[in-house]
Amino acid sequence: MTVFRWDLDKTYLDTNFESFRGLVRAATEPAHAKRALPGAALLLRSLGENPDNTITVVSGSPTQMRSVLSEKLRLDGIRFDELVLKDNVGNVKRGRFRAVRGQLGYKLPALLRARLRTDSKQREVLFGDDVEADALVYSLYADAVSGRVGAAGVSRVMERAGAYGDEIDDALEALSEIPRADVVERIFIRSERGVPSRRMADLGSRVVPIRSWWQGAIVLMDMGHISQADVESVLLRVHDREGADPWVMGALAQDIVRRGWVDSDVVLGLSAPQAVTEAIESALSALQGHGIGRNDGSTETIDYLGLLSSGAWNKRGRADTGD
């Protein structure tokens, strides 16, 4: 039994909110016009095929979009158990303008409350992107639930990140009722801003930065969560959306193997169009066995306050994209 918790914008949906026009479009376009990122719908459907799995969505999208987002997920054939959205209108009415853009003060309490509604035996896999604070929030959530970071530590990090007092109280109240257990297996972070992998490494090897949901699918198969056939379906979809360029798939395969998330034989065992297979074989051969060694997803001690105080991560938990 596993809980898969997904973000939406830039994680599942190809949303443009960097411009005013993009914001307006995201808020007004109908469900059928919204586009899932390549392979995301196939991957999420595969995860939902097991009736013992739970699919939850915790998104910073406003509550006013609940009906259109629910319809979009249903149009994509996604089975989901819970959809948690952000009350931005309420925040504006109350003059809580930091909360409109802030992520840690919203998402961490939302995740902790969601954990209270979860069977204590269920493990978790989390999915987000590098546009907002997903990597830092998810890591802090995992460490709080496991007991590696106590209530006082959670409070200090949230305060440093600019959370409001009631958001901190909400998080601590939920945390006080959660049985401590090391439940988060992996944290998948899709690269949208191009944050270097070494910046994500600040949050430990539990965080898996990916450049494509095909890479995520390979790791999930290696973890035993989806089948090889599922991964091959995602491969074909991503290949098609990437302009049918087999060398793109070769580069993605080389990248995920080089960073130690799967062994090369896992990728070489996949069936694909001949041109793709040849590109993957060539790319992996070029590694000549070089890489960082197998990444086991072990958890290191993370200095959250230090990260927020450094130039690498800002108050919103976003990683700097510079070198």
Image (cartoon, rainbow, N blue to C red):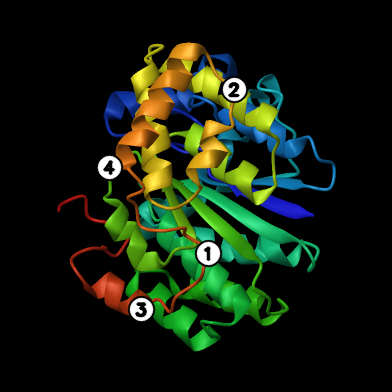
Mark number, residue 18 = none
Residue at 62 percent across and 50 percent down: it is: 5
Instruction: Looking at the image, tell me whether mark 4 or mark 1 is earlier in sequence order.
Output: 1
- The 10 Å Cα crowd at callout 4, few under 14, some 14 to 19, many 20 or more, is some
Instruction: Looking at the image, tell me whether mark 2 or mark 3 is earlier in sequence order.
Output: 2
Looking at the image, residue 19 sits to the left or right of residue 222; the answer is left
* Residue at which label 3 appears: 303
Looking at the image, residue 227 sits to the left or right of residue 216; the answer is right
Q: Which of marks 2 and 3 is in front?
A: 2
Q: Is mark 2 in CB contact (under 8 Å) with mark 1? A: no
Distance from disc 4 to disc 2, alpha carbons, whole Å, reads: 29 Å
Residue at 57 percent across and 72 percent down: it is: 171
- The 10 Å Cα crowd at callout 2, few under 14, some 14 to 19, many 20 or more, is some
Q: Nearer the viewer, mark 4 or mark 1?
A: 4
Instruction: Inspect this view and state whether residue 318 appears.
Output: no
Q: Which residue lies furthest to the right in this view?
A: 51
* Residue at which label 1 appears: 108
- The 10 Å Cα crowd at callout 1, few under 14, some 14 to 19, many 20 or more, is many
Q: Where is 164 relative to 17, above or below?
A: below
